Every structure is written in structure tokens, then in C-alpha cells.
Image (spheres, helix red, strand yellow):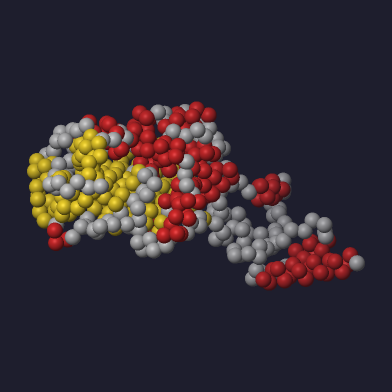
């Protein structure tokens, strides 16, 4: 009976090896048939030929079996070769590999029930939306200037920081959660997961896509728990790179950012050789107006920029019925997109842009509602920025993460944040708006309408704008100080 069992097992091993495109060596079979109680397959009959070839390795974690084999050969006398396993490949520095997440399905504008179902199943906590909004107002007034064009994505920065905070501990975590207005890292990760699912749309009609990635140095260690959170809650791509080869690492990051911002942004940095982990978030928005502007109505007019008057293209809408708001030193109205998102436009009184920025949420939700026929003149504009955000984040309260940091939930290594950079792009024209952002966090080792006369609202001086998702989540916010630039 024992011989029969051994024969069956040997045949099974030969069949498995053939199915994987490998040949079974006679010696290997003999070893297997000698022990019928502790059998482990020499091949992996799945999508990949072997566990170390092209499989989407989730993290460059320590391989205990490999280490044990190295220890066994350590005592071999000099001049004698250890017994070789014909089925085992020689150890070598791993090639860069990647793992890609599976993003949620998105419904088009013609699938109204599908849209409602997706948004309903992933309805976020009101407290979380309030937290993102508060973070937006607190950070935007520090980032944006009243005298310069600016486009900033608070959501891209928020998600990147949340992904980073998932690997923090101790006082470092306390500071990061405080700035992000979150109670705990696990709750924050779940909130971000729901947000990504709720906002995600990748159709011909409109797009709101966010992508996260961990670029991990090929000899850095990352804890399994952190990898699990990054991939499951943040839909993170995982890529191993050799940061010592800065040119190749830069090309990898540049390619990722370009792909996930529809080619609108190029990576402006270059990772340092000491970088251990590079956290990247991208955000891309594209939608058409629910009521587009007519191109034949676009004409050159004067915009009163801080540096002097300039001539630029203005889009126009004839008298149309809508609501606008009058506040302390500003007017505000919203232009809806076809997917339910909107662009909020805040027009400060001349010379009061800084004061309105400092108002925070009052500028975006306060004021007295007015109903009227509005004649609108809005300039076309296109803005690109690169922001360095380390000082701003430290000013907001994240200090430990940059020096005496604790990221022990991320790695066994002592890590800290070395830089935080954001690149942004926005273009607004007669058809709609397109906007993109990337945020990079580099980690290094340490030791009823009134039919009265129409109201004309001309955005012919510096104004504040914000693109909000259908649920009010701020995606991009900024200042248009000179649309002619």
C-alpha cells in the first residue's frame, strides 16, 4: 500500500510539473516519495510560473524559507559546494515588480439607477466630509496667494497623508490624525475607502479618478499589515524600485503620474538616493457643463489683474435664472456639471481676496441667497502649479513626522518624511473643466425667481474657485488672479 501511495504521488508531481511547463528531476521525485507525510509542491499551478516571476508581489517582505536555506549553507567547509537543488534558482537582486488594484465599476450618466446605487452603497459619514472640508479651508488659506494664480488639490494631499498616517504610531500618529480631523487611523482608512468608491467614475461622460502608489526601495522592508491597508482601503499600486538608480526611479514615478493624470502633469522632482518609500496620490477630474457656454459668445474683454489690466477671452451666458449669494465682501454662485459636480465661484470685492480666503467655509456656504436672472461673464483660464508643502504642514501641526518620527506600523526601519510636493493643473473653457493633481510624500530613513432686471456678475478681477464633487467633497480650489498668464 505504501508503494502504491508513493507511485500515485509521483505521478501527481509529474503531472503538476508538466502543467506548469517544468520537468521533474528524478532525484527530486525520489526525495518526495521517501516522505509521504510532509509533501509540498515544487510548482505553482496558477497564473504565474513561479512565486518570484512576474507575480504581483505585495511587498518586499523577508522570505523566511530563503533565509533558512542560507543559514543551512553557512556551515559548509571552505572549498566545498553546498548540495544544489535542481529546481531552485540562484539568489539575485529582485527586478522591479508591480501589483495593480482592481478599481470599482463606474456607471455612466445614462445609468441613473447605477449612479444612485453606487453612491448609496458608499455613502460616507457626514463627520468625515466635514473633516475633509475643514482641512481644505485650513490648508488652502496657507497655500494660496491673493496676487498669484493658484490651483491646489486638498483632497489629493488629504488622501496621501491618510495613507502615510496608516503607517504611523505614537505622537506622530496623534499629530497627523489631529490635522486630518480623524479619530483613529483604521477609521480614517475605511472612510477613505468609501470616499474612493463613492467618487470613482471613469466613463466617456465624466471622470473623477484617484490612484495611489507605494514606490518601495528594493531592499526596504514594509510590514504586511500596512500593505494590506494600502491595497484594500486605498487601492494602492505597489512597485519596487531601486532608488540608488535615480534616473530609472524618476522615470517610473513620472510614467505613473503621467498615466493617471491623462498626460496633463509631469513629475517635477527627482527622488533622493536615500528614499526608502515614495507615496504618490493622483487625482483627475473631467466633466462638461450641464449647460455649456456658446463659443460664438466668447470675446476679448478686460480683466483687472493685481499687476494691471489684461485682455483675455471671456465666456458669456445671457440672462438665465439662478441663485447667487451675497456675503460680507463677496458674491458667490455655482455652475453645475452634467454629473452633479459643480464649480463654486467666489468673487471678492476689489482688494479683498485675502480677506475672503481667510474667511474659510463662510465664503463657500455663507451669505444671503438672491434669486434673479443673471448675466454671467467668466474668463477662460488654465493654471499649473507646483507646491512645496512641508512648511505648511508643519505650521498646521504635523511636526514629528519630519524629524523624530514613528512610522513603526509601516516598516521596521526608522523612517521620516523628507518632502511633500504637489503638482496641479486646471483648464476651464466653454465645454467644461479638466483638472489634475499629484501629491508625493517621500520617506527616508533616520537614525422662485423674481422677474426683475438681470443682475450682471462679471468675474473681471481676481476670484476664488472650487470644484466640488456631487456630495460636496472639495476636489480643487484656487485663485484666478490673471487668466491671461
**Is residue 245 positioned above or below 4 on the image?**
above
Q: Is residue 223 visible?
A: yes
Find residue 371 and report its horizontal and vertical position in percent: 22, 44
Q: Is residue 423 visible?
A: no
Figure label count: 0
| In the image, farthest residue toward the right | 1
What residue is rendered at 28% in x and 57% in y?
Answer: 290
Residue 302 left/right relative to 204: left
Image side of residue 367 versus residue 173, left or right = left
Where, quadrant-wise, is the N terminus in this rendering? bottom right
Height in image: 229 above or below 262?
above
Which residue is nearer to you in this view: 474 or 439?
Answer: 474
What residue is at 66 percent from the left and 62 percent from the top?
44
Name the residue rendered at 12%, 47% in the picture. 453
Q: Position of residue 293 (x, y in %)?
A: 20, 57
Q: Is 297 displayed left or right of 360 in the figure?
A: left
Horizontally, residue 202 falls left or right of residue 189, namely: left
Q: Is residue 302 above or below residue 447?
A: below
Q: Position of residue 463 (x, y in %)?
A: 20, 41
State the residue in front, 477 or 419.
Answer: 477
Q: Give the residue drawn at x 74%, y 67%.
A: 13
Between 81 and 480, the one lying in front of the other is 480
Residue 369 in which image quadrant: top left
Amino acid at each position: 500500500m505504501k508503494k502504491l501511495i508513493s507511485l500515485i504521488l509521483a505521478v501527481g508531481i509529474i503531472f503538476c510539473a508538466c502543467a506548469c511547463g517544468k520537468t521533474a528531476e528524478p532525484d527530486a521525485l525520489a526525495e518526495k516519495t521517501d516522505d509521504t507525510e510532509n509533501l509540498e509542491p515544487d510548482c505553482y499551478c496558477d497564473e504565474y510560473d513561479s512565486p518570484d516571476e512576474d507575480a504581483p508581489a505585495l511587498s518586499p517582505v523577508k522570505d523566511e524559507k530563503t533565509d533558512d536555506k542560507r543559514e543551512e549553507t553557512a556551515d559548509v567547509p571552505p572549498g566545498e559546494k553546498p548540495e544544489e537543488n535542481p529546481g531552485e534558482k540562484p539568489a539575485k537582486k529582485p527586478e522591479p515588480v508591480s501589483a495593480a488594484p482592481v478599481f470599482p465599476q463606474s456607471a455612466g450618466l445614462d445609468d441613473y439607477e447605477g449612479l444612485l446605487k453606487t453612491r448609496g452603497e458608499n455613502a460616507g459619514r457626514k463627520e468625515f466630509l466635514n473633516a475633509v472640508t475643514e482641512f481644505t479651508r485650513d490648508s488652502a488659506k496657507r497655500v494660496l496667494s491673493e496676487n498669484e494664480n493658484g490651483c491646489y488639490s486638498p483632497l489629493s494631499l488629504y488622501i496621501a497623508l491618510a495613507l502615510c498616517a496608516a503607517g504611523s504610531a505614537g505622537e506622530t500618529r496623534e499629530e497627523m490624525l489631529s490635522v486630518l480631523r480623524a479619530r483613529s487611523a483604521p477609521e480614517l482608512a475605511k472612510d477613505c475607502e468609501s470616499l474612493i468608491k463613492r467618487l470613482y467614475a471613469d466613463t466617456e461622460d465624466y471622470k473623477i479618478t484617484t490612484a495611489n502608489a507605494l514606490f518601495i526601495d528594493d531592499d526596504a522592508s514594509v510590514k504586511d499589515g500596512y500593505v494590506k491597508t494600502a491595497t484594500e482601503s486605498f487601492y494602492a499600486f505597489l512597485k519596487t524600485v531601486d532608488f540608488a538608480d535615480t534616473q530609472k526611479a524618476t522615470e517610473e514615478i513620472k510614467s505613473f503620474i503621467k498615466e493617471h493624470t491623462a498626460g496633463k502633469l509631469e513629475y517635477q522632482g527627482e527622488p533622493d538616493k536615500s528614499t526608502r518609500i515614495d507615496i504618490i496620490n493622483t487625482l483627475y477630474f473631467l466633466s462638461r457643463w450641464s449647460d455649456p457656454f456658446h463659443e460664438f459668445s466668447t470675446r476679448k474683454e478686460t480683466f483687472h489683474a493685481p499687476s494691471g489690466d489684461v485682455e483675455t477671452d471671456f465666456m458669456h451666458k445671457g440672462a438665465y435664472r439662478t441663485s447667487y449669494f451675497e456675503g460680507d465682501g463677496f458674491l458667490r454662485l455655482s455652475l453645475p456639471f452634467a454629473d452633479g459636480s459643480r464649480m463654486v465661484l467666489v468673487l471678492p470685492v476689489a482688494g479683498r481676496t485675502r480677506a475672503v480666503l481667510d474667511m474659510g467655509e463662510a465664503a463657500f456656504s455663507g451669505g444671503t441667497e438672491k434669486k434673479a436672472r443673471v448675466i454671467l461673464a467668466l474668463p477662460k483660464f488654465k493654471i499649473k502649479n507646483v507646491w512645496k508643502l512641508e512648511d505648511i504642514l508643519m505650521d498646521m501641526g504635523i511636526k514629528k513626522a519630519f524629524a523624530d518620527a514613528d512610522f513603526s506600523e509601516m516598516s521596521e526601519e526608522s523612517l521620516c518624511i523628507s518632502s511633500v510636493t504637489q503638482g496641479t493643473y486646471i483648464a476651464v473653457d466653454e465645454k467644461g473643466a479638466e483638472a489634475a493633481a499629484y501629491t508625493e510624500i517621500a520617506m527616508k530613513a533616520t537614525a422662485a425667481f423674481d422677474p426683475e432686471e438681470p443682475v450682471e456678475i462679471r468675474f473681471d478681477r481676481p476670484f476664488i474657485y472650487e470644484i466640488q464633487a456631487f456630495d460636496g467633497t472639495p476636489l480643487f480650489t484656487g485663485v484666478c488672479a490673471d487668466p491671461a498668464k
